């Protein structure tokens, strides 16, 4: 079970990233992990980002999920301003299909870690699952719910492909 | 402080990956986090990998750092066989400079998360720092040591570049 | 002629891969080679994959065609768990157009071979043709059918392009 | 056991590819599979290539391993001229590190299959192993030798990394 | 003016390439250069390609324009079988947007030249223009028509952009 | 002529970037433009970066040249915190040869501009020249020195290549 | 405030680039910076380009924004013919999504600087903002308008994402 | 036989390109085709480039070979200023291994053709061979020498690879 304060912050650079990042939110909902979603732009609201990152631990957050696209600086900057684990989701960009987002997030220099997930929706779902795995280290109920989730996922895989789908 | 059993497993696909992955080990040493390093090849020792991944939680591990190169399947397969958080380090490959390693690790489908770090040495250091950030959520001493580490890192940055280095 | 047990297994990571992989099935049908198609996910059903791969030779399979997308681990993992020839089909992914699938399948380390075909539909057709070429080494009837297939393919190529198509 | 005529042809575009392709030859030697190695350039000796490919089945070859670099047309052209299974090895090129070789070999259109291996040395070793897996379908002794080879490969993987290597 | 026999052959790997390659034909029409367009597949009709390339000079062709996609071997193989200048057009492929076509055509080894144009329609137009520039070396009328074409092209460029288009 | 306070700040993420960025300094020296070079790491010294960027206009700087490598956030973050023109230099990285640096710097979202130069030394020289062009708009002496510089550059180009160099 | 003559020239290679480049015009309009937009093709109207670039400073322009796609030579050629600061916008191309445009513009050799912005619309907006930042160095009113623009941009970022957009 | 005026111009952007481009010169020497080699920089000597390109036909040149690296504008600009056939050689660049050179040369818009060869030495050799193929259309002696060159090339390919080289 999670604390009274939501343990997970889901932040993103703009409203347009929500289409991707709500997949993280939906996954946390399914696992019974509470979270708070906010728009924090590294580039357009650098002061808000600074304040958020510096205060995130004191707000009670334990894990931060950050999604951004293009020259995506949000995950790395938050990881440099805040000591919590940060998981980055590269949002798919228009001209480079998210390669720019991916490289901007994953290629952090030694010293500032960002655990990076896949480009787009899959990455958002997995950022939530990774946050849940982290929280489950000290939350046996959540660990059980995760085990159930994994089992149902396996059980949902049909044995044979079908033309009817 | 960490438990009596090492909380972190550092696994890698071959002895040749150790040159990269020992940077994770050195970083954990510097932070006072104990770990165990093992060679577990997804391709050459799949049975060993199955056994390791299925038993990792019961062995007491809390976080797994997995490094591999080329068509790098170790981090993703361990994440699919084991419910712990897995952080993947793409080892730099000869012909593709690690792009193949990176894509094979980071582009996991929805359902199985691997938090991926940068290609090569920086990624290995950061996998250790990310593991420490995760463990520090419930370990205030480690959190303090991490804060100190971050402060010394900042303090070590000179104000002006010099030709003498 | 093929044995009573289908000599070819067509496996894929998810139902959504069937749209691509049924092109392999259709090609084998056209050549009179029997096969069995199954969903075997390296990531969501690792135990099923383990069991399938370990038992594939005893089930009577002679060649395995494996399709997967993104961080595509299925072909390589099956090749590491099973001594039969494995032919991999990179399924086209959304953000990277299948480059991630291709690199994850083709860049196997020395020791574990996966014969990789083109991304998408062409690769699925060709995996079937390659399986047929392998089986035709000891099946003269199939060799004749393949020769016919290649001749008709050549004969079907018009001499001049036309605006009417 | 293999036939009196070598079942495997190893062909390559130039003498300079031998540094890579001899890894295929060495692997076949280790498995007791006989082969013949020839230089057959699609571009500089197209007539030799036509003659070789058209006659390869009658020469008694069962599998062809073809290595080439840059705009690598040898594997695909041989596969279009000859009904045997062809396994392609992208030789590492100078300016593109073998990406041009890889794309030129693997992206064959539907109709003409080339089973493609990794760029460079690993690909050459694996082309040999894949040829051996194909021949082992009807050669139980070779199948046993391959099983032994795989077991020794697994046994050779140390449990722990060491700084002494 | 051109000879009675058309001086330019436009060849392509399949009917589906005509959508791209007819832009070369239209451009030659506009310049009053006669040509013949044929389907010649390196992979599906290698004998036809062999015969075409070996006989092209005797047929009276002076320049060959060859379009192909994916692992595009047609331009390079024709250049190796025939001593005429060959200009290659990379047809845009589905999964790699023509990068595979481009690399397969342009990265020819020393000894066999293919003058490569841009991917897709622009490349087809320019292959025709390049053929015309070659023929114009010894055809002053064509040189004049080309000069006119270039002047009209320049004159057709408006001075100011407009929202009405 | 420049003001008493140096009009150009050259900032970089680490001492190791100085090898590249001193080419910007040398070029400004050659043009008689004064500057100040500082190490300001977005990731290791985020507070220093905030303070620098927020105060740069008041310090009298008119143009900022920022060099960084890997997931290079320095140019973009400074451009978001400071209203001066920022010119970014992608420092060549080890595994990706600077492609990650380039994409992280150039692909800024609408709203926050970074004028990006070439990867490595050429980019550093050109960042200085671009800063000089900007300052020359209101500094005729500098404009004259730039014109001289451009003329000498042209004059230094030999007419014929020589084997003696 | 700007001079009577427009200080900014927006040039582009063709009418089809206007869809992208009008975003630069709109942004300058919003900031009260006057400009003139012209079509100047490096390839189809090289004489017009030569004349424009040689005369741009005398026409009273202070900054040039140049957009082009594919093998985009306009920004670099104008920068080599004219001493003003040039900002380049890579227009998104069909087959390479603008990567060719980006590399052709940003990878200028030492000696000729082009400040390059992002591919497509974001780059066009930012080229205008960068031009405005340059002009604002000696135009306090414009500096104030830019500060207001940046503040409104920050204020327009909602605190929380919403499903209603 | 060639005219008294050399029919081929070999131009390049800088002295440093000569290491690559002298392979074109050596190949023309071997074929008995005369040429003139000059340094003509699109960026550093644009006036020289304009003069050269505008006058090349009148100087008696029939074919132009142009080599350049990075944002390589020389081949395309010369092709836009001069009606002769232009063959472009992408010189291998430091950070992008010549990919930037290749894209800048090959991706020309419809209207201005550049026949592009491979990156680096192979491309320089092939540009010379392509120029010779063009000249041989109306020069039977050269056609014979080219045929001999091709035959010797084929004859020089050994039948079997050897460890002694």
Image: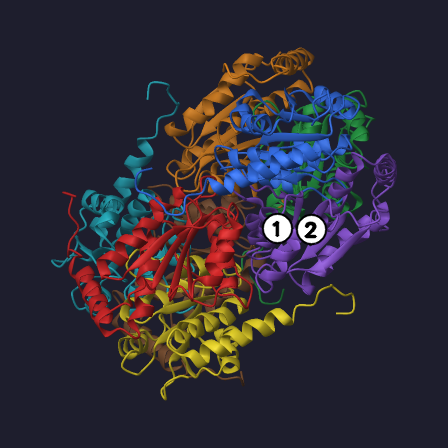
Chain colours: A purple, B blue, C green, D orange, E brown, F red, G yellow, H cyan
The numbered disc on residue F129 is: none
Residue G92: x %, y % from top left: 52, 65
Position of E110 compared to H57: left or right? right
The reply to whether dot 1 and dot 2 touch (C-beta < 8 Å) is yes
Res. E66 in view: yes
Nearest to the observer: residue D75 or residue G113: G113
Q: Chain of mark 1?
A: A
Q: Chain of mark 2?
A: A
The numbered disc on residue A78 is: 1
Mark 2 Cα shell of 10 Å, populated few (<14), some (14-19), many (≥20): many
Q: Quadrant of residue E143?
A: bottom left
Q: CA distance from mark 1 to mark 2?
A: 10 Å
Q: For the point 53% across and 81% down, which residue is it? A: G30
- The residue labelled by disc 2 is A56
In the image, residue G14 above or below residue B39: below
- Locate the N terminus of chain C by quadrant: top right
Q: How many marks?
A: 2
Q: For the point 47% across and 46% down, which residue is it? A: E104
Position of F38 compared to A56: left or right? left
Position of D165 compared to H19: left or right? right
- Locate the C terminus of chain C by quadrant: bottom right
Residue C36: x %, y % from top left: 81, 34
Dot 2 falls on a residue whose secondary structure is loop
Res. H93 in view: no
Residue A133: x %, y % from top left: 77, 38
Q: Nearer the viewer, mark 1 or mark 2?
A: 2
Residue H87: x %, y % from top left: 31, 56
Q: Quadrant of residue D41?
A: top left
Q: Earlier in the sequence, mark 1 or mark 2?
A: 2
């Amino acid at each position: 079970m999670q604390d009274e304060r939501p343990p997970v912050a889901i932040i993103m650079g703009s409203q347009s990233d929500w289409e991707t990042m709500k997949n993280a939110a939906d996954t946390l909902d399914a696992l019974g992990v509470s979270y708070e979603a906010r728009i924090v732009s590294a580039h357009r609201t650098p002061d808000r980002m600074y304040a958020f990152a510096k205060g995130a631990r004191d707000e009670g957050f334990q894990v931060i999920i950050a999604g951004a696209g293009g020259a995506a600086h949000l995950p790395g900057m938050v990881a440099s301003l805040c000591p919590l684990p940060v998981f980055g989701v590269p949002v798919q960009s228009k001209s480079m299909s998210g390669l720019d987002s991916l490289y901007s997030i994953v290629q952090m220099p030694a010293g500032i870690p960002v655990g990076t997930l896949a480009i787009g929706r899959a990455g958002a779902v997995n950022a939530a699952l990774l946050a849940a795995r982290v929280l489950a280290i000290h939350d046996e109920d959540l660990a059980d719910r995760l085990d159930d989730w994994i089992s149902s996922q396996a059980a949902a895989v049909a044995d044979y492909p079908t033309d009817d789908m």
